Amino acid sequence: MHPPRPVTARTYRFALRSIEDRFGAGNFDDAGDAIVEALRDAYGQAERCSVDFSFDTAHSNPWFHVLVVAIDALPESVQPDFLERLAEIGLQPEGL
């Protein structure tokens, strides 16, 4: 039996309201594509990363609903450039 793989994913949370302001109502697919493109622009080996998208809509107030993006195997040295690319396209993860 193999030991469990360590959790190394970096998690980014984007307010759904800000995505809709930038991409239009309900247009989360284009936002996801833009996030992956920003990753590719920032990291020449983006194919090594695993990207997982999910929604956190547990709060009763939609103001607090978010798109959760987990990126596994993203080197720490790449994160500043990735965040800069996100800012260029109008996406700012919460809490950073």
Image (tube, grey):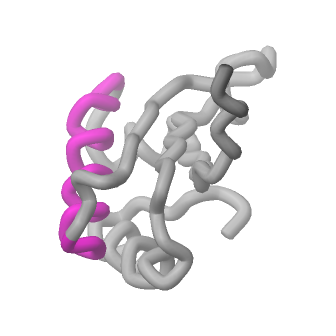
Q: Where the N terminus falls, by quadrant?
A: top right
| Rendered view: 86 above or below 17 | below
x, y percentage for residue 46? 26, 59
| Rendered view: 63 above or below 44 | above
In-image side of 84 versus 71 (left or right): left
In-image side of 25 versus 44 (left or right): right
Q: Is residue 36 highlighted in magenta?
A: yes
Which image quarter: residue 33? top left
x, y percentage for residue 3? 71, 32
The residue nearer to you, when weighing 2 against 62, is: 2
The residue nearer to you, when weighing 3 against 86, is: 3
x, y percentage for residue 27? 28, 29
What residue do we see at 39% from left, 42% from top? 50
Magenta residues?
A: 26-44
- Is most of the magenta stretch helix, strand or loop? helix
x, y percentage for residue 69? 50, 42
What residue do we see at 30% from left, 54% from top? 48
What residue do we see at 67% from left, 69% from top? 96
